[in-house]
Image (cartoon, coloured by chain):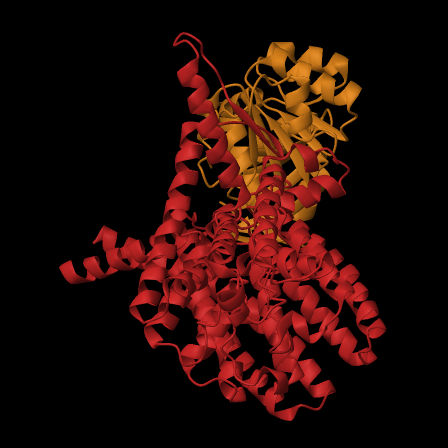
Chain colours: A orange, B red
Amino acid sequence: MYIIIVGCGRLGSTLAKELSIGGHDISVIDHDGEKLSVLGSGFNGSRFKGVEYDNDRLLKAGIKQADYILAVTSDDNLNITVSLIAKKIYNVPRIIARVGDPSRKYIYDMLDIETICPTQLGVEILKRKISEKNVEVLAIIGKDTEIIELTVKKHKPCTVKSIEEKYNCILSGLMVENRFTFPPKDALVPYGAKIICTILKKDRAKLITSLAKETVL
Amino acid sequence: MNTFNGRFYSIFIISYYIGYVILGIALLMVLPILIAAALQEWNPFWDFVITMAISVILGISLILIGKETRLNKTMVQWKHGFVVASLSWIILMFLCAIPYLLSGHVNSILDACFDVMSGFTTTGLVLTQDLDHISLSLNLWRHMLTFIGGQGMIVLALTFLLKDTGGAYIFYVGEAKDIDLVPNVKGTAQIIWKISMVYLFIGTAAFWFIGMSIGLAPLSAFFNGLFIFASSWSTGGFAPYTQNMMYYHSFSYETLTLIFFILGSLNFGLHYAILSGNRKELVKNIETQSFFITTFLTSAMAVLWLSRTGVYADAVVMFRRVVYNVLSAHTTTGFGSVYARQFALEWGDFGILILIIAMLIGGSACSTAGGFKGLRIGILFKSILADVKRLLSSERNVKVFRFHHIKDQILADSLVKASALIVICYLITFALGTLIGTFCGYPLASAAFESASITGNVGLSIGVTTADMPAVMKIYDIIAMYLGRLEFLSVFALIGFIIGGIKKCWTN
C-alpha cells in the first residue's frame, strides 16, 4: 500500500514508523525539518520537507500513485486543504483527515472528507472512565449501537439467554478469570466475569444499572 | 550488567538476520543441483547437495539463536545493519567456496575463497585451474555468484525472505546501495530484481541467438549466453573458458557484451527512471554526464596512443582491442579481448596508466559496477568548480550549487566530504595493493594495474594473478575486493564492532 502521511508530529511520526515496519510504502511531508528527523536516520520510507499543500511536494511524494492520504497535522486548515487537493485533483482512493478542533468537524463533514478525531476519542474514553465504572466502550456502530465490555457485579448468577432477552442485546464474549469463551446460550454469568455485548444505546443504562452496579444484598 | 546484556542482544539480532541471508543463498543452490542432475554430472551434484545441507543447517541454527529478535520486535540500529551486511559476505564467501573446493579445480581453500569473493564483488579474476574442463553446474554457480553479488545478497534476502521491514533500509545501505525507487526499501529491492530479470531474459535470448549464428551448438549457446549475460550485466567479467572473450572470436558477440556491460554499469535509479518514461534523465543525470566524459577521454587517449605506437592496424581492430578493453575496464567488467601479457608487452606505460585510471573511476553508484563511481567523480568535480566560482564572486553573494541525480539536489558540504572520504579510501587501498605487489617482486606498472583492477572490482589481469602468486597477495586481494565492493564503511563498522566486543570481554 502506498501511503502519504502529511504532518510529522507525534501522531504522524508514530504512524509512519509503524506502517513502514508493516511493509507499506510511506512518504512523509512536513514543513519542519526537525520534526522529520524524529523519524530517525534508519526510517524505511521517504520524507519531504516543504509546505504540506504544495503541489510539487505532493507530486514528489507520489500522490499520483498513492492509495491513501492521511492528513494528520494539528492544523485543520492544512488538513482540509491537503484533503481537498487529494480528492478533487488527484482522486486519491481514500483520504482520512485528522480533526484537530472537534468543533470544526462539521466543515470536514460538509466537504465529505473522512475524519478521525483523536481529541474527541481521548475525551470520550476519559469521560467514560470517570462516569461509568466497570464499563468500557469497545466500539461505536452507527448512531445508536455500541459494543461494550462490562464487568458483572451481580451476585446472583443469571444465564446468557436471560440477559440477551431482558436487555435486547447480543452477548458475543464471556471472560471468566481472563479466559475468553464464546458463551453458549445456557451458560451462567458469575460474579466478576466480563461480558462483551452489542447493545442499543437506549438499553445500555438499564443493563448497567442492573448488572454492573454493586448491589447490596 | 546492563551493557553486558546489550552486547549479547546485538549478537542475537545480527545472527537472526545473517541466518536469513545464508538461507537465501542456500535455497539458490537448488538451481545448480537441478542442472547437475539434468546433465547427469553426479560429482558436482553431490558437491552442491553437501554445500546446501551445510548452509541450510547453519542458516537455520543462526535464525534459531536469534529467534528472540522476532518475538521482541527490536529496533535494528545502524551498527547491526552494517555488521550484518559485512559479516554475511564473509560467511557466505566460505560457504560458497565449498563446491569449488570439492570439485578439485582449486589448489587451496584460499584460492577457492579468492574466486568466490571475486565472483561476489563482480571482479572476475580467476584462480580456478583448468577452467575449460570444469563441470557445467559449477560454471553456472560461478556465474550465479556474480549475478547475485552484483545486485547484492542483502537485496536478495530483502526481496524474498524478510517479512518485517523494520531495519530494511539500514541493511540496504549497509550493502552500499543508496537509491530510493519507491519509499519502502523492500519495494526498491524488488524493482532492482525485476529490472535485472527483464534484462536477463532479453540478454540471454540475444546471446543465445548470436551464439548459434556464430556456430555454437544450441544447448552450449544457451549456457554460454546465460553465463556471458550474467557476467556482463553484473559487470563481473567471468567467462566459461580460460580465453575469456577471445574464445568466441566474434565481433557481434563482443558488441553485445559491450552493450550489456554499459547498461549494467548504469545506476538502477536511472534504469527505473527511463523505464517509467522519464527519458530526459539519461541526459541530465550527473552520473551519465561524468561517465560519458571520462569514457570518451580515456578511450580517445588510449586510441591516440596505440595508433602512435602502431600496435593495431586498422579501425575495426582498434575498436575491438582498444576501445573494448578501455570500456570493459571503465565499467569495471573485466572482459578481456587481448591476452593478459599483451597489456604489459604491447600497450606501453601510457596505455597501462589509462586503463588504471579508467578502472579506478568505475561505473555508476548503485549499479553492479565498482570503482570510485561516476557520481562521486561528478560531485567532486562540481564542488571544485563551485569553490572556484565562490572565490571569484563577492563575499556577499550567497550561491547554492546544485546537481541533478534522479532529482535536483543541493551540493552540500557534507555530501562532498563523504564522497571525498570514500575516494581517498579507494586510493589508499589501491596504493597499499601496489606496495604489496612491488614488494613481492612484480614490476611497478604490473603491480599497479593489478591493484587497480582489484580495488575497482574490475577483473582485467596483466598476468600477476595466477595460482602461484604469494599467499599474502591473495589475502590482500580478497580484502581489497571486499572493501571496494562494500564501500568501506560497513567493513569498518564490523571491525569496530568486533574490537568493541573483545574489549568488553577483556574488561569483564
Q: Quadrant of residue A87?
A: top right
Q: Position of residue B168 (x, y in %)?
A: 52, 49
Does residue B98 appear left or right of residue A76 in this picture? Answer: left
Q: Quadrant of residue B471?
A: bottom left
Placement of B167 over or under B38, stated as above or below: above
Residue B68 appears in the figure? no
Q: Quadrant of residue B336?
A: bottom right
Does residue B204 appear left or right of residue B36 in this picture? Answer: right
Question: Which residue is pictured at 64% across the width and 92% down the height?
Answer: B42
Question: Which residue is pictured at 50% across the width and 68% down the height?
Answer: B345
Placement of B134 over or under B175, stated as above or below: below
Q: Residue most toward the left?
A: B507
Question: Which residue is pictured at 53% across the width and 61% down the height?
Answer: B347
Q: Nearer the viewer, residue B323 or B139?
A: B323
Q: Quadrant of the C terminus of chain B?
A: bottom left
Count of picture labels? 0
